[in-house]
Image (cartoon, helix red, strand yellow):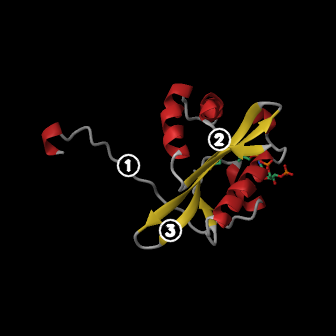
Amino acid sequence: MIRTALADDAASIAHLSTAIGYPNSAEDILPILLRILDDKAHVVLVFEVSGSVVGWVHAAEQLNLESGPRCEILGLAVDPDSRRLGIGSQLVHAAEMWAKRQGFPRIGVKSNATRLESHPFYKQVGFVHVKTQHVYRKSLDAYGDRER
Ligand SMILES: CC(C)(COP(=O)(O)OP(=O)(O)OC[C@H]1O[C@@H](n2cnc3c(N)ncnc32)[C@H](O)[C@@H]1OP(=O)(O)O)[C@@H](O)C(=O)NCCC(=O)NCCS
C-alpha cells in the first residue's frame, strides 16, 4: 500500500535512509519531515507491507529563476531486502501521479553516478538521461560571525 507519510514514519524513513548511506535517527528526520509535510510543494509517500514501511519517495516543486517551476524526485529508498519486487517503480509512479495532479508536464531526478542500481532503474521506469553535472560545495566555517 502506498500512502502519504506521517510524522510516525520518521523512524522507518531514518532506518531506510541509513541503509542507503545517509545515517539518520528518527530525531534527525522528524523535524525535517514535519516541515516537509506542512509544505504543499512537497510530497513524501511510503510503501507499507503488513504495517512496515519498506520504501519511501520524496518529490517536490523546485523553482528556478531561469527555467521556472519543475518537479523533482529528491529522495527514493527501498529496503535492501525488498528490492526487485516493483516497490521502487510503484513509488515513482505514485510520485509521477502527484506531479501530474499539481500540473507539472514532466518530472526529473538527479541521481549520484555511484548509485549504480538507480541508473538502470530510472531508465526502466521511463526516465531519459539528459545531462551529467559536477556538484560543488564550499564550507562557510572560515567566515567569522561578524562577516555574516
Ligand atoms: C533504485 C531503487 C529505488 C530501486 O528499487 P526497487 O524496488 O528495487 O526497484 P523495482 O523492483 O521497481 O525495479 C524496476 C526495474 O528497474 C530495474 N532495476 C532495479 N534495480 C536494478 C539493479 N540493481 N540492477 C539492474 N536493474 C535494476 C530492473 O529493470 C527492474 O525490473 P526487474 O526487477 O523486473 O528486472 C533501490 O535499488 C534503492 O533503494 N537503491 C538505493 C537508493 C537509490 O539508489 N535511490 C535512487 C537515488 S535518487
Where residue 96 sits in the image (x, y, percent)?
A: 69, 60
Q: Quadrant of residue 22?
A: top right
On the question of residue 120 being in view, the answer is no
Q: Marks 1 and 2: which is nearer the front?
A: 2
Q: Secondary structure at mark 3?
A: strand
Calculate the distance from the C-alpha at mark 3 to the C-alpha at mark 1.
Answer: 24 Å
> Which residue in the structure is indicated by mark 1?
137
Q: What is the crowding at mark 2: few (fewer than 14 residues within 10 Å), some, or many (at least 20)? A: many
Give the residue type that dot 1 points to: Arg
Q: What is the crowding at mark 1: few (fewer than 14 residues within 10 Å), some, or many (at least 20)? A: few
Q: Which mark is residue 146?
A: none
Q: Is residue 117 left or right of residue 58?
A: right
Q: Nearer the viewer, residue 87 or 81?
A: 87
Q: Nearer the viewer, residue 129 or 147?
A: 147
Where residue 118 sits in the image (x, y, percent)?
A: 69, 51
User: Which numbered disc flags the more N-terminal residue, 3 or 2?
Assistant: 2
User: Which numbered disc flags the more N-terminal residue, 3 or 1?
Assistant: 3
Q: Secondary structure at mark 2?
A: loop
Q: Quadrant of residue 84?
A: top right
Where residue 16 sits in the image (x, y, percent)?
A: 65, 33
> Which residue in the structure is indicated by mark 3?
69
Is the residue 108 above or below the residue 136 in the image? below
